[in-house]
Amino acid sequence: MSLRIGKWLAICALCILLILQLDAAPLENDSPKAAMRVKRMTPFWRIMSMRPVGASCRDDTECLTRLCRNQRCCLKTYAD
């Protein structure tokens, strides 16, 4: 009989510990670094995703030439 009680006490203690662990688990990250996802691409896909000269762009990292001027990929370093 005491073995049954001991078994049930162990099960109850384990359940309580699991419930406490769930209660302590974070639901969302408050740090701003965790919210930002770093773009990780292999060199092959990085080259394949770059835009040719004359294509529209938002910044220098999108262009094959690494020069985005007036929202267009260009070869020249000065503004058109």
Image (spheres, rainbow, N blue to C red):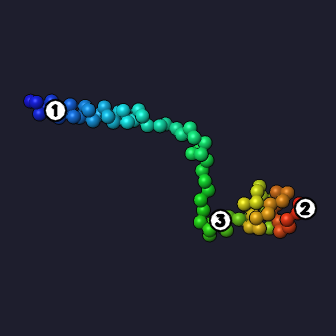
Q: Residue 42: name its quadrant.
A: bottom right
Residues at discs 2 and 3 in contact (Cβ within 8 Å): no
Q: Residue furthest left?
A: 1
Q: Percent position (x, y) of residue 8?
A: 19, 32
Residue 3 left/right relative to 37: left
How many C-alpha atoms fall within 10 Å of the one at disc 2: few (<14), some, or many (≥20)? few
Residue underneath mark 3: 46
Of the 4 image quadrants, the one containing the N terminus is: top left
Residues at discs 3 and 1 in contact (Cβ within 8 Å): no
The numbered disc on residue 6 is: 1
- SS state under label 1: helix
Residue underneath mark 2: 80
Q: Amino acid at mark 3?
A: Arg
- Residue at the image point whose x is 43% and y is 37% from the top: 25
User: From the viewer's perspective, is residue 33 above or below residue 46?
Assistant: above
How many C-alpha atoms fall within 10 Å of the one at disc 1: few (<14), some, or many (≥20)? few
Indicate which disc, 2 or 3, sits on the residue closer to the N terminus.
Answer: 3
Residues at discs 1 and 2 in contact (Cβ within 8 Å): no
Q: Percent position (x, y) of residue 28?
A: 52, 38
- SS state under label 3: helix
Q: Amino acid at mark 1?
A: Gly
Q: CA distance from mark 3 to mark 1?
A: 61 Å
Q: Percent position (x, y) of residue 23?
A: 41, 32
